[in-house]
Structure formats: structure tokens, C-alpha cells
Amino acid sequence: MRHVYVEMKGVIPGPVLEALRAEFGHKLLVRCMAIEEMRDVRDAPQFKPEPWALEPSEALWFFRNRNGLTQGELGMRLGGIAHQNISAMEQGVRPIGRAMARRLARYFGVPVQRFLG
């Protein structure tokens, strides 16, 4: 077997990438539609380990970027939050409140503690 081609649309969950990598190793290639080239699965942003020692503002930036969202897109998906508010939370200028932390955790599928100090 030379290479394995799997087509998925949207964000590929980390556990799925991990299972594919465990099964196929370096033979698995991931195609990034934005770049239109084949890449080793280990180079995919979703495969990079999650840094657990991040401040809430840094975690927000990390998860937003890992999911390929702009601040405006994330704000819209969270129910019409202005991109300026997302920016202020990422910069640590505006705290992430409990309600917002719950929304972010639900959206990104991570524990709410990731967004609380």
C-alpha cells in the first residue's frame, strides 16, 4: 500500500486523526483544500498537541485558530458576538465570563475550565 486517501469535510477531530495515524502511520496523507496539496497527517493543525498550560485568552486564540475561524466568524457562530469582543478576550483586555466560557466550551467541545482563570 503506497498511500491512503480519506476525504473529510470540516474540522477533523483529533481522535479520528490519531486513529488514522495509528493505523496508517506515514502512509496517511491529508489534503488541505485551501492549499491543494497532500501533506503528512502529522503536519495537520488538528494533530498538533493541545497546549494545556495556556491562559484562558490564549486558549481562546488557540481553539479559534485551530478551527480556522476568524474572530468575526466565531462571534457569529456564538450568536452574534462582535469581533471586537472576541479580540478583547483573546488579548486579555476583556475577561471571559462564566456564560461565555460555557458557550466556548460547548462550541469547541472542550471542558469549560479551559476558558476560566
Image (spheres, helix red, strand yellow):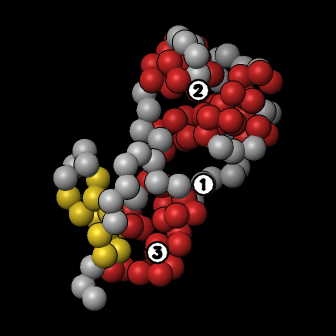
Tell me what residue is drawn at x 66 percent, y 31 percent.
104
Q: Which of the two discs, 3 and 2, sits closer to the camera?
A: 3
Mark 1 lies on residue: 50
- Distance from Cα at disc 1 to Cα at disc 3: 17 Å
Mark 2 lies on residue: 90
Q: Secondary structure at mark 1?
A: loop
The location of residue 28, given as percent across then percent down, is 35, 74
With 56 as the anchor, is 64 left or right in this view?
left
Q: Quadrant of the C terminus?
A: top right
Dot placed on the residue nearer the N-terminal end, 3 or 2: 3
The relative height of residue 76 versus residue 116 in the rendered view (above or below) is: above
Q: Secondary structure at mark 2?
A: helix
- Residue 91 appears in the rendering: no
Tell me what residue is drawn at x 47 percent, y 81 percent.
23
The location of residue 83, given as percent across then percent down, is 50, 15
- Distance from Cα at disc 3 to Cα at disc 2: 32 Å
Tell me what residue is drawn at x 45 percent, y 23 percent.
73
- Residue 115 appears in the rendering: yes
| Kind of residue indicated by mark 2 | Glu
Pointers 2 and 1 in contact (C-beta within 8 Å): no
Mark 3 lies on residue: 21
Q: Which of the two discs, 1 and 3, sits closer to the camera?
A: 3
Checking the image for residue 23, the label placed there is: none
| Kind of residue indicated by mark 1 | Glu
